Amino acid sequence: MSDPRAPDGTRWLRRDRAGASLAFDKRGLHWRDLYHNALTMPGWLLFGLLAIAYFAMNLLFALLYWLDPAGIVNARPDSFADHFFFSVQTMATIGYGLMAPQSIYANILVTIEALIGLTGFALAAALMFARFARPTARVLFSDVAVIAPFDGHPTLMFRVANQRRNRIQEARIRVDLVRDEISAEGIPMRRFYELPLVRARNPVFAFTWMVMHRLSPDSPLRALEQGAAGYLELIVTFSGIDESFAQTINARHSFLGDEIRYGYRFLDILTVTPEGLRVFDFGRFHSVEKIVPATRG
């Protein structure tokens, strides 16, 4: 993977779907927000960093204990392992009673390590709780959006589904069009247009939701229907109250210009069994088909 650089020497970390480059300078300013990084980094990376910090602190204190051969009772003076495991017992406040500090130097180290251990474990526990207690959304968006006639009007449509076996109360969706334009002064700029939806609120969102925007004569998407070129993107934001956690959840998705299919429609995913049960076939959730114009006999 290439490592593009900005004109001022900063390094691009990633590019978002809207094409904007996100950069952090080489001084590591992004590491100043450690709490946010700890909450957003992968779980395995956070656990690995905590494990590395734990072993590094114990190795450091083991070395300090080892500098005083007679500071720990029942610890072999030439055994670094004994001093390391004594440090583990001290930091975790285990205290088996087989080894104990006996010199002023060792007792001072024990006091410092006990304070660091208590503080460190409290911070690690709070951080883990914050990660696991944070509400998450399992909302599925269709891979593409389509523009097809609906009730006699061309309509933008895409699907949303709740992947959990519960309900999302007061679910709300907002769709914004992002488009590059040239101002009257000839300045290129990116503009955002909110698209009014046929139904932007779902009081009890349990299964699926077909989100629709009618392409009225003043709709910003009329340019897409007319085949206008240029960059555009649909940004979808979702929010609601998860009834299991009684907390607000959020989700976000976007459709690029080539992910909006004109003249297609979604396949039906709802069937009714002979017993009268409604069955949703999520295997067809993303499936679309070309609209065949009706022919006169």
Image: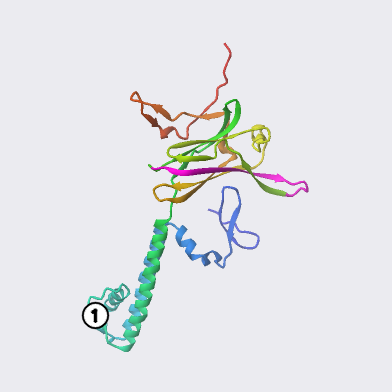
Please tell me which residue is depicted at 39% across the width and 62% down the height of the picture.
48
- The magenta span reads 166-187
Please tell me which residue is depicted at 70% across the width and 44% down the height of the picture.
181
Q: Count numbered badges in the picture.
A: 1
Q: Nearer the viewer, residue 146 or 70?
A: 146
- Image height check: is 66 above or below 201? below
| Residue 128 part of the magenta-drawn span | no
* Amino acid on which disc 1 is placed: Met
- Image height check: is 132 above or below 58? above
- Image height check: is 268 above or below 178? above
- Magenta stretch: dominant SS? strand
Q: Which residue has dot 1 on it? A: 99
Q: Position of residue 217 (x, y in %)?
A: 68, 32
Please tell me which residue is depicted at 67% across the width and 48% down the height of the picture.
190
Q: Position of residue 156 (x, y in %)?
A: 58, 34
Task: Give the left or right position of residue 60, taking residue 176 as reference.
Answer: left
Q: Residue furthest right?
A: 185
In the picture, the quarter occupied by the C terminus is top right
| Residue 173 part of the magenta-drawn span | yes
